[in-house]
Amino acid sequence: MQTIDAIRDDFALLDDWEDRYRYVIELGQDLTPFPDDARDEAHRVPGCVSQVWLNTSYGDGSDPKLSFEGDADAHIVRGLVAILLALYSGRRASEILATDAEKTLRDLGLDDHLTPQRSNGLRSMVKRIRRDAQLALGKVA
């Protein structure tokens, strides 16, 4: 999987939004296969027009590292999942909560080039990831 820095660099090289969309779709094609048994309501991300699933694994300690797996039933959304996984997966819960996903997505230009429904879905995914980080830190009752 690509790092978020590599994705930023690649986006900077692509001037045309058609090329950027193709790149986002390619990122989604590189996702680790998502387990079929996790394609259920417990792993589904509400608020997304497409079907999106997210699985969270927690490391040890009071500020554990979280790892994420994700998938979606739409090509462009799978790519957006890949971008969020690159941004968040493998980071400590406190780092996840300190990360401004909206700024990252703005820097990539995604906020101006996604439909309102896709933008809402992206926010729903970020909300779910942040909630899982809060759970890991014991900040959610």
Image (tube, helix red, strand yellow):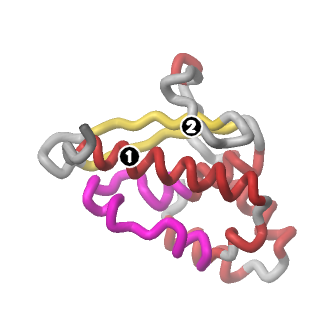
Callout 1 secondary element:
helix
Q: How many marks?
A: 2
In screen coordinates, is 40 left or right of 56?
right
Q: Nearer the viewer, residue 7 or 110?
A: 110
Query: In the rendered image of this protein, does residue 133 appear above or below residue 102?
Result: above
Q: Residue furthest top?
A: 37
| Residue 137 x, y percent position in the rendering | 21, 47
Provide the residue designation for mark 1. 131
The residue at the point 32 percent across, 56 percent down is: 91
Provide the residue designation for mark 2. 45
Mark 2 is on which residue type? Val
The residue at the point 54 percent across, 69 percent down is: 102
- Which residues are drawn in magenta? 84-107
Real-space CA distance between mark 2 and mark 1, rounded to the nearest whole angstrom: 12 Å
Residue 39 falls in image quadrant? top right
Q: Nearer the viewer, residue 71 or 51?
A: 51
